[in-house]
Image (cartoon, rainbow, N blue to C red):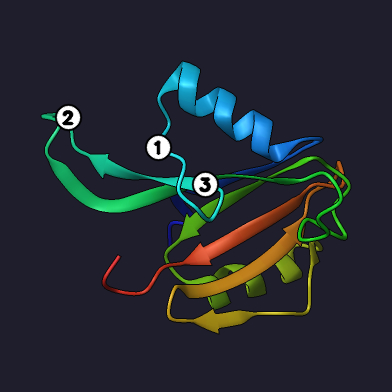
Amino acid sequence: MKRVTGIGGIFFKAKDPVVLRAWYKKHLGIDIQDWGGAVFSWANAANEPDKGTTVWNITAADDNYFAPGTSSFMVNYRVADLHFLLDALRTEGCNVLDRIEDSEFGKFGWVIDPEGNKVELWEPPAAL
C-alpha cells in the first residue's frame, strides 16, 4: 500500500506572524485568510481542478503544536490509510506519538523523525 500520497500542509513558526503573513500576501500574492493561513486547491496537468488541497499556515514562535518536535516547521503528509501506516512505522521502530485525532477534517497522527521534527500524517475524509 502506498504510504504518502501528497502534501496536505506546510506549517511554520515566525517571530512576528502578522508581519510575515502580510509580507507573503503582498509580495507573493498568497491569499491569507483570517485564521492565519491559506488553502491551495490542486490542479491536474491541464490546470483543471483536481481533488485535494494543501494548507499553508504561519503560527507564533511560541506555539506548542509542533511539540515534542524541536523544529520551527512541520509538514503534513496526506496518507491513504493512517492506521496502517502508524502500525507499520511502529513495527519499523519509529517514534510514533500515541495519539490519533479523528474529526470532520479527517484522521491525524504523528511521528518524530530522526532529526526531531514532528511529522503530521493526515488521512483526509472521503470528500477531500
**Which of pointers 1 and 3 lies earlier in the amino acid sequence?**
1
Measured as percent of width and height from the top left, residue 116 is found at 87, 47
Q: Nearer the viewer, mark 3 or mark 2?
A: 3
In this rendering, the answer to whether 87 lies above or below 61 is: below
Check disc 2 and report its element: helix, strand or loop: loop
Dividing the picture into quadrants, the one containing residue 128 is bottom left
Residue 126 in view, yes or no: yes
Check disc 3 and report its element: helix, strand or loop: strand
Measured as percent of width and height from the top left, residue 29 is found at 40, 24
Measured as percent of width and height from the top left, residue 49 is found at 16, 44
Which residue, given by chain and number where applicable, does mark 1 sit on? 31
Residue type at mark 3: give it.
Answer: Gly
Mark 1 nearby-residue class (10 Å; few <14, some 14–19, many ≥20): some
Camera-side residue of 83 and 67: 67
**Which of pointers 1 and 2 lies earlier in the amino acid sequence?**
1
Check disc 1 and report its element: helix, strand or loop: loop
Q: Quadrant of the N terminus?
A: bottom left
Which residue, given by chain and number where applicable, does mark 3 sit on? 37
The residue under the point 78% across, 55% down is 66
Instruction: State left or right for residue 119 relative to residue 41.
Output: right
Which residue, given by chain and number where applicable, does mark 2 sit on? 45
Residue type at mark 1: give it.
Answer: Asp
Dividing the picture into quadrants, the one containing residue 97 is bottom right
In this rendering, the answer to whether 118 lies above or below 96 is: above
Camera-side residue of 125 and 20: 20
Residue type at mark 2: give it.
Answer: Ala
Q: Nearer the viewer, mark 1 or mark 2?
A: 1
Camera-side residue of 41 and 14: 14
Could you tell me if the residues under marks 3 and 2 are in contact, i.e. CB atoms within 8 Å? no
